Image (spheres, rainbow, N blue to C red):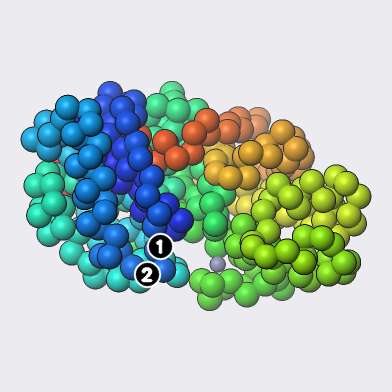
Amino acid sequence: MNIAIDFGGTNIKIGLIDEGRVTVKASIPAYSEQGLAARLPEVEQTVEELLRENGLSLPACRGVGLALPGIVDADNRALLSINDKYPDGIGFDFRRWVENAFALPFVMENDARAALLGEAAYGVARGTKDSVLMMFGTGIGTAAIMNGAIVRGRHYQAGILGGHLATDIHGEKCACGNVGCMEAQASHWALGIRASRMPGFSDSPLANRPGALGYEEVIAAGEQGEDWARRLVDSLLEHWSAGIVNLIHAYDPEVVVLSGGLMKSADRVLPRVIERTLASAWTPWGAPRFAVAKDPETSVLLGLSHLADSNDPHRKG
Ligand SMILES: [Zn+2]
């Protein structure tokens, strides 16, 4: 049994994983802008409850896996950089926390990498050696596996910054410092900014209600004949497709895994994204397969457990 903890921007997902299956899981609010340390007592308590409810104890567990939505040094198990979430996570001593709270070996990884590891070990990318993932959360996370190995790079940022490859060099300013990143053009957090730039949006019912815009309601507004929404969705599709083409050109995958909240609208957006991507990508050998992650929340937890069970000596103890 492994303990997997996914520190998301909105929720912290906690699971007990064994043999590639989630035995039980729980979700608690992240309040991530308030910091990491403040949330750890409730994380520990939730793990304790899950174990107790299932008749288990810490000594029965093999290890712990932690995922964070930032640049993670998987060897030294440190958070190197993160945007707007868990500001105290940089420099935080995860080793000491895990030792005090659980006294188990542990691994730590970027959340999108963990998700792709989960999909490759147990999910829709199983049986492949070369895959990429694009995960539509608040931002857009990506990851790549090449020749069976997760791509990390010299400074642990390879593969995961696909959302920050520009799809419009004259586009929106991104939180990362770059301009026109796919994430700044077509992520969930960018949706309101993009909508506010569309002529006609201010007359829409969606402009005059509180709360952040969602993909589903923008797609629905477009289908109901709101012109701004139809044009915005067309633009989003262009950016997502350009982003996937960038990943295909960079990592040469045989499967492209798509994951996250946008996939609730997969039947509406996916055919158009695939058509546009394949029309633009240079793949003389054929075409990658596209696969939708069945349960995005679970794939991160499964990937962490898989990583915890891997035999890499640098990521243990
Ligand atoms: Zn960016």
Q: Judge: label 1 CB < 8 Å from ligand 1.
A: no
For the point 70% across and 47% down, the residue is 216
**Residue highlighted by disc 1:** 31
Quarter of the figure that contains the N terminus: top left
Q: Nearer the viewer, residue 31 or 148?
A: 31
**Residue highlighted by disc 2:** 34
Q: Nearer the viewer, residue 23 or 110?
A: 23
For the point 13% across and 51% down, the residue is 101
Secondary structure at numbered mark 2 = helix
Say which quarter of the image contains residue 62. Answer: top left
Please state the quadrant of the image where ligand 1 appears: bottom right
Report crowding for label 1: few under 14, some 14 to 19, many 20 or more residues within 10 A (C-alpha). some
Instruction: Answer above or below: position of 243 versus 256.
Output: below
Instruction: Answer above or below: position of 282 versus 60.
Output: below
> Across the whole image, how many numbered discs are drawn on residues?
2
For the point 55% across and 44% down, the residue is 260
Q: Is there CB contact under 8 Å for labels 1 and 2?
A: yes
Report crowding for label 2: few under 14, some 14 to 19, many 20 or more residues within 10 A (C-alpha). some
Residue 30 visible in the displayed image? yes
Residue 21, how many percent across, how many down? Answer: 34, 26
Q: Nearer the viewer, residue 199 or 117?
A: 199
Residue type at the position of mark 1:
Tyr
For the point 77% across and 48% down, the residue is 219
Residue 218, how many percent across, how many down? Answer: 76, 52
Say which quarter of the image contains residue 38. Answer: bottom left
